[in-house]
Protein backbone atom coordinates (compact mmCIF):
# COMPACT_ATOMS: atom_id res chain seq x y z
CA UNK A 1 0.00 0.00 0.00
CA UNK A 2 1.52 3.24 -1.18
CA UNK A 3 0.20 5.46 1.62
CA UNK A 4 3.21 4.92 3.77
CA UNK A 5 4.52 7.41 6.28
CA UNK A 6 6.96 8.72 3.66
CA UNK A 7 4.12 9.47 1.25
CA UNK A 8 2.15 11.23 3.98
CA UNK A 9 5.15 13.46 4.64
CA UNK A 10 5.45 14.27 0.94
CA UNK A 11 1.75 15.02 0.51
CA UNK A 12 1.67 17.11 3.67
CA UNK A 13 4.72 19.12 2.60
CA UNK A 14 3.32 19.82 -0.86
CA UNK A 15 -0.13 20.65 0.46
CA UNK A 16 1.24 22.91 3.20
CA UNK A 17 3.38 24.72 0.64
CA UNK A 18 0.37 25.22 -1.58
CA UNK A 19 -1.68 26.45 1.36
CA UNK A 20 0.83 29.24 1.93
CA UNK A 21 0.52 30.49 -1.65
CA UNK A 22 -2.79 32.05 -2.64
CA UNK A 23 -1.90 31.64 -6.34
CA UNK A 24 -0.85 27.99 -6.03
CA UNK A 25 -2.18 25.66 -8.73
CA UNK A 26 -3.47 22.14 -8.36
CA UNK A 27 -0.65 19.61 -8.75
CA UNK A 28 -1.03 16.08 -10.10
CA UNK A 29 1.17 13.00 -10.07
CA UNK A 30 0.77 9.61 -11.70
CA UNK A 31 3.06 6.72 -10.85
CA UNK A 32 3.72 3.09 -11.70
CA UNK A 33 6.21 0.59 -10.39
CA UNK A 34 7.33 -2.94 -9.60
CA UNK A 35 8.67 -4.52 -6.39
CA UNK A 36 9.82 -8.12 -6.09
CA UNK A 37 7.96 -8.49 -2.76
CA UNK A 38 5.01 -6.61 -1.26
CA UNK A 39 6.41 -5.24 2.01
CA UNK A 40 3.81 -3.41 4.14
CA UNK A 41 4.56 -2.17 7.68
CA UNK A 42 7.32 -4.73 8.00
CA UNK A 43 5.19 -7.67 6.82
CA UNK A 44 5.69 -9.61 3.59
CA UNK A 45 2.25 -9.83 1.97
CA UNK A 46 3.29 -11.42 -1.31
CA UNK A 47 5.53 -11.42 -4.37
CA UNK A 48 5.78 -9.54 -7.66
CA UNK A 49 3.90 -6.37 -6.77
CA UNK A 50 2.90 -4.30 -9.80
CA UNK A 51 1.43 -0.93 -8.80
CA UNK A 52 -0.15 2.13 -10.40
CA UNK A 53 -1.66 5.22 -8.83
CA UNK A 54 -2.38 8.93 -8.94
CA UNK A 55 -2.21 11.79 -6.42
CA UNK A 56 -3.55 15.34 -6.45
CA UNK A 57 -2.75 18.25 -4.11
CA UNK A 58 -4.31 21.69 -3.80
CA UNK A 59 -5.15 24.40 -1.25
CA UNK A 60 -8.32 26.02 0.05
CA UNK A 61 -8.49 28.87 2.59
CA UNK A 62 -5.13 28.04 4.16
CA UNK A 63 -5.67 24.27 4.27
CA UNK A 64 -3.68 21.81 2.22
CA UNK A 65 -5.75 19.16 0.45
CA UNK A 66 -4.46 15.87 -0.92
CA UNK A 67 -6.11 12.76 -2.33
CA UNK A 68 -5.06 9.69 -4.22
CA UNK A 69 -5.80 6.24 -5.53
CA UNK A 70 -3.47 3.22 -5.57
CA UNK A 71 -3.88 -0.19 -7.19
CA UNK A 72 -1.57 -3.15 -6.70
CA UNK A 73 -1.54 -6.65 -8.19
CA UNK A 74 0.59 -9.39 -6.63
CA UNK A 75 0.91 -13.05 -5.61
CA UNK A 76 -0.68 -13.30 -2.18
CA UNK A 77 0.85 -15.41 0.59
CA UNK A 78 -0.43 -13.91 3.82
CA UNK A 79 -4.17 -13.49 4.27
CA UNK A 80 -5.70 -16.01 6.70
CA UNK A 81 -8.43 -18.22 5.31
CA UNK A 82 -7.15 -18.50 1.74
CA UNK A 83 -7.19 -21.97 0.24
CA UNK A 84 -3.58 -21.90 -0.96
CA UNK A 85 -0.63 -19.50 -0.98
CA UNK A 86 0.64 -17.47 -3.93
CA UNK A 87 -2.78 -16.81 -5.42
CA UNK A 88 -3.42 -13.84 -7.67
CA UNK A 89 -4.51 -10.91 -5.51
CA UNK A 90 -5.22 -7.23 -5.91
CA UNK A 91 -5.66 -4.23 -3.64
CA UNK A 92 -7.35 -0.91 -4.29
CA UNK A 93 -6.71 2.00 -1.92
CA UNK A 94 -8.51 5.34 -1.82
CA UNK A 95 -7.23 8.06 0.47
CA UNK A 96 -7.67 11.72 1.28
CA UNK A 97 -5.99 14.19 3.60
CA UNK A 98 -6.39 17.68 5.03
CA UNK A 99 -3.35 19.46 6.46
CA UNK A 100 -2.55 22.79 8.10
CA UNK A 101 0.78 24.53 8.63
CA UNK A 102 0.90 25.88 12.20
CA UNK A 103 4.43 27.24 11.88
CA UNK A 104 6.11 24.99 14.43
CA UNK A 105 4.62 21.84 12.93
CA UNK A 106 2.32 20.79 10.11
CA UNK A 107 -0.63 18.70 11.24
CA UNK A 108 -2.75 16.42 9.10
CA UNK A 109 -5.78 14.16 9.30
CA UNK A 110 -6.66 11.62 6.65
CA UNK A 111 -8.75 8.62 5.68
CA UNK A 112 -7.78 5.38 3.89
CA UNK A 113 -10.12 2.80 2.37
CA UNK A 114 -8.62 -0.52 1.28
CA UNK A 115 -10.34 -3.11 -0.87
CA UNK A 116 -8.45 -6.41 -0.99
CA UNK A 117 -9.46 -9.18 -3.38
CA UNK A 118 -7.95 -12.65 -3.65
CA UNK A 119 -9.32 -16.00 -4.76
CA UNK A 120 -11.84 -17.06 -2.12
CA UNK A 121 -11.38 -13.97 0.06
CA UNK A 122 -12.45 -10.33 -0.08
CA UNK A 123 -11.48 -7.92 2.68
CA UNK A 124 -12.37 -4.27 3.17
CA UNK A 125 -10.65 -2.11 5.79
CA UNK A 126 -10.77 1.54 6.74
CA UNK A 127 -8.37 3.71 8.70
CA UNK A 128 -8.33 7.27 9.96
CA UNK A 129 -4.88 8.70 10.61
CA UNK A 130 -3.47 11.71 12.43
CA UNK A 131 0.00 13.01 11.63
CA UNK A 132 2.49 15.74 12.46
CA UNK A 133 5.50 16.75 10.36
CA UNK A 134 8.47 18.98 11.10
CA UNK A 135 11.89 19.46 9.55
CA UNK A 136 14.96 19.40 11.81
CA UNK A 137 18.34 20.28 10.31
CA UNK A 138 17.12 19.34 6.86
CA UNK A 139 15.67 16.01 8.04
CA UNK A 140 11.96 15.39 7.51
CA UNK A 141 10.55 14.07 10.79
CA UNK A 142 7.03 12.69 11.10
CA UNK A 143 4.79 10.81 13.50
CA UNK A 144 1.55 9.24 12.26
CA UNK A 145 -1.10 7.31 14.20
CA UNK A 146 -3.46 4.99 12.29
CA UNK A 147 -6.79 4.04 13.85
CA UNK A 148 -8.68 1.10 12.35
CA UNK A 149 -12.36 1.94 11.76
CA UNK A 150 -13.11 -1.70 10.99
CA UNK A 151 -11.27 -4.51 12.70
CA UNK A 152 -8.31 -3.82 14.95
CA UNK A 153 -4.90 -2.59 13.85
CA UNK A 154 -3.78 -2.35 17.50
CA UNK A 155 -3.39 1.40 17.16
CA UNK A 156 -0.53 1.23 14.66
CA UNK A 157 1.76 4.25 14.68
CA UNK A 158 4.91 5.07 12.73
CA UNK A 159 7.81 7.42 13.43
CA UNK A 160 9.87 8.27 10.35
CA UNK A 161 12.96 10.20 9.34
CA UNK A 162 13.92 11.13 5.80
CA UNK A 163 16.72 13.02 4.10
CA UNK A 164 17.27 14.00 0.46
CA UNK A 165 20.76 14.55 -0.96
CA UNK A 166 21.07 16.36 -4.28
CA UNK A 167 23.85 14.71 -6.32
CA UNK A 168 23.46 16.72 -9.51
CA UNK A 169 20.88 18.67 -11.43
CA UNK A 170 18.96 15.50 -12.27
CA UNK A 171 20.05 12.98 -9.60
CA UNK A 172 19.12 12.82 -5.91
CA UNK A 173 19.59 10.20 -3.20
CA UNK A 174 16.75 9.67 -0.72
CA UNK A 175 17.31 7.89 2.59
CA UNK A 176 14.53 7.04 5.02
CA UNK A 177 13.82 4.97 8.09
CA UNK A 178 10.47 4.19 9.75
CA UNK A 179 9.78 2.58 13.14
CA UNK A 180 6.40 0.91 13.69
CA UNK A 181 4.70 0.62 17.08
CA UNK A 182 1.46 -1.04 18.24
CA UNK A 183 0.00 1.31 20.83
CA UNK A 184 -2.52 -1.12 22.33
CA UNK A 185 0.01 -3.94 22.53
CA UNK A 186 2.78 -1.64 23.72
CA UNK A 187 5.41 -3.12 21.44
CA UNK A 188 7.56 -2.25 18.43
CA UNK A 189 6.82 -4.01 15.13
CA UNK A 190 9.59 -3.44 12.60
CA UNK A 191 12.30 -1.00 11.58
CA UNK A 192 12.04 -0.36 7.85
CA UNK A 193 14.81 1.36 5.89
CA UNK A 194 14.72 2.59 2.31
CA UNK A 195 17.25 4.05 -0.12
CA UNK A 196 16.19 5.32 -3.54
CA UNK A 197 17.97 7.10 -6.36
CA UNK A 198 15.81 9.65 -8.15
CA UNK A 199 16.73 10.30 -11.78
CA UNK A 200 14.80 13.20 -13.25
CA UNK A 201 15.27 12.45 -16.93
CA UNK A 202 12.76 15.18 -17.92
CA UNK A 203 11.32 18.19 -16.11
CA UNK A 204 8.24 16.16 -15.12
CA UNK A 205 9.32 12.51 -15.11
CA UNK A 206 11.43 10.76 -12.47
CA UNK A 207 12.64 7.15 -12.40
CA UNK A 208 13.53 5.80 -8.95
CA UNK A 209 15.19 2.42 -8.38
CA UNK A 210 15.12 1.56 -4.68
CA UNK A 211 16.10 -0.96 -2.03
CA UNK A 212 14.08 -1.49 1.12
CA UNK A 213 14.88 -3.69 4.09
CA UNK A 214 12.91 -4.37 7.23
CA UNK A 215 14.18 -5.62 10.59
CA UNK A 216 11.58 -7.61 12.55
CA UNK A 217 11.13 -6.42 16.13
CA UNK A 218 8.08 -8.47 17.17
CA UNK A 219 7.01 -12.12 17.22
CA UNK A 220 3.88 -11.75 19.32
CA UNK A 221 1.27 -14.53 18.80
CA UNK A 222 -1.53 -12.01 19.46
CA UNK A 223 -0.61 -9.81 16.48
CA UNK A 224 -0.04 -10.15 12.74
CA UNK A 225 3.70 -10.10 13.45
CA UNK A 226 3.81 -13.70 14.66
CA UNK A 227 6.63 -15.34 12.72
CA UNK A 228 7.68 -12.09 11.03
CA UNK A 229 11.19 -12.09 9.58
CA UNK A 230 13.78 -9.67 8.30
CA UNK A 231 13.02 -8.70 4.70
CA UNK A 232 15.07 -7.28 1.82
CA UNK A 233 13.26 -6.10 -1.32
CA UNK A 234 14.01 -4.04 -4.39
CA UNK A 235 12.05 -2.32 -7.10
CA UNK A 236 11.53 0.60 -9.45
CA UNK A 237 9.04 3.49 -9.48
CA UNK A 238 8.24 5.92 -12.30
CA UNK A 239 6.55 9.22 -11.40
CA UNK A 240 5.20 11.91 -13.70
CA UNK A 241 4.01 15.27 -12.37
CA UNK A 242 2.02 17.97 -14.10
Image (cartoon, helix red, strand yellow):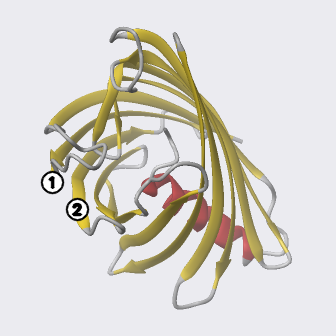
Residue positioned 29% across, 38% down in the render: 43
Could you say where residue 9 lies in the image, as x and y percent from the top left?
50, 62
Q: Nearer the viewer, residue 139 or 146?
A: 146
* Mark linked to residue 181: none
Could you say where residue 152 lies in the image, as x and y percent from the top left?
47, 53
Q: Is residue 10 left or right of residue 216?
A: right
Could you say where residue 177 lies in the image, as x and y percent from the top left?
27, 57
Which element is circle 1 on? loop
Residue positioned 27% across, 46% down in the render: 194
Q: Which residue is mark 1?
A: 217
Q: Nearer the viewer, residue 213 or 16?
A: 213
25 up-or-down from 94: above or below = below
Q: Earlier in the sequence, mark 1 or mark 2?
A: 2
Q: How many marks?
A: 2
Give how far apart the Cα atoms at labels 1 and 2 are: 6 Å
Q: Which residue is mark 2?
A: 188
Amino acid sequence: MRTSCKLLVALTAVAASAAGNAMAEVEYEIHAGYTNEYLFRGLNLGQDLVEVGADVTAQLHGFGLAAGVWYGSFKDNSVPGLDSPNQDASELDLYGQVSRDFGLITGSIGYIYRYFDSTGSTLNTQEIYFGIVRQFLGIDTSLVYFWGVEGDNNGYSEFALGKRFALSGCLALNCGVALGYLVEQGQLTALTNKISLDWGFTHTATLSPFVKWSIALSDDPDTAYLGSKNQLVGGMLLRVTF
